[in-house]
Image (cartoon, rainbow, N blue to C red):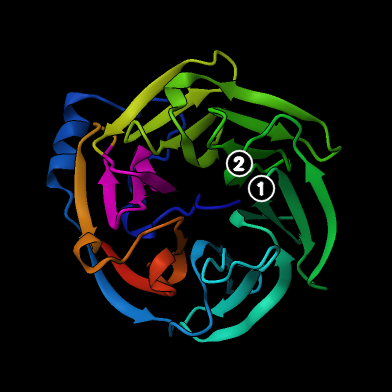
Amino acid sequence: MKNLSKLTFIAPFLLLYACGGTNTESNQGINDSIEVSLSHVWSTDTTQLATPECVTYDPASKVLYVSNLNRANDIDNDGYIAIVNTDGSVKNAHWVEDLGAPLGNDIYDGHLYVNDGTEIVKINIESGQIVEKIEIEGAKRLNGISVGPNGDIYSADIEGNKIFKVNQAGEVSIAIESEELDRPNGVLIKGNDLIIASFNAQKLLCANLESKEIKTLGEGLENADGIIALDNDNYLVSSWSGFIHFVGNDSKVQKILDTKDQNINAADITFIPEESLLIVPTFNANSLMAYKLEIK
């Protein structure tokens, strides 16, 4: 399940699952004392990845799966999935090919699920074979994806302002639909909530799956994209423009990375907990960048 890594260095705090975090006076004091920083560790070369949009860490095989749009070409169905080692070396640049426009990906039960246009592509990780393509009727363009512990797939339709749900029987429904989502990009299932990065509204949102109530967890997140959940209802959020923000459970936002002026994007991120490494796909810069995350 993507991006639900708990960080051991803040383990004394409780991991909570309610929308809105814990907005108490004492917790605001805790967040005020937290110092969050990133330091660059490695970058992949720029010759084997082509417009990387999403990366997911697989703790079972200890590799990274990278969705490549390959926008340098005008050729249809030229997108691909690459496998990258956790030291930044490329293990298999074209592991799975012939995809249209692969975006968000996530792992469940030995399979990689990839959003590709209006389809969710299911790939057997052991064989590298596409075993199923699930057409999402009514979708316009699927972007972020998150698979829950029971195998339910949540896929954000960035053009349609809705989040689709697909269960393991292949049944498709709409989990959340609202103009308030305002181009939902990244999505993360967390308990009975969906955490959603709103690209246009520049917000981190929390939508309850039962009540459908939507709350704002953080604002001022330009072109919000990928999400990582930390302990104590804190988050890391990437901005496609080239930022990483720390969003505290008191809704305070800290900018901890800025590569915008270097024309380096920050798309859909992942985290390697045992190495405290944040992995950032740079989109137009055609690479992955790894950063050591420190929280004091």
Residue 117, labelled with which disc?
1
- Quarter containing the C terminus: bottom left
Query: On the picture, is 192 further left or further right than 37?
Result: right
Tell me whether circle 2 and circle 1 mark residues in contact (CB < 8 Å). Answer: yes
Mark 1 crowdedness (10 Å alpha carbons): few <14, some 14-19, many ≥20? many
Percent x, y of residue 96: 72, 71
Residue lying farthest front?
A: 74
Percent x, y of residue 124: 80, 64
> Looking at the rendering, which quadrant does residue 31 occupy?
top left
Indicate whether residue 247 is drawn in magenta.
Answer: yes
The reply to whether residue 110 is in sight is yes
Name which residue lies at 33% across and 42% down: 234
Amino acid under disc 2: Arg
Percent x, y of residue 145: 59, 45
> Looking at the rendering, which quadrant does residue 129 occupy?
bottom right
Residue 141, labelled with which disc?
2
Query: On the picture, is 54 further left or further right than 246?
Result: right
Name which residue lies at 18% across and 30% down: 26
Percent x, y of residue 282: 39, 66
Helix, strand, or loop for circle 2? Answer: loop
Q: Nearer the viewer, residue 146 or 263?
A: 263
Amino acid under disc 1: Gly
| Whether residue 66 is situated above or below residue 194 in the rendered picture | below
Q: Nearer the viewer, residue 117 or 147?
A: 117
Residue segment shown in magenta: 221-248
The reply to whether residue 282 is in sight is no
| Whether residue 175 is situated above or below residue 243 in the rendered picture | above
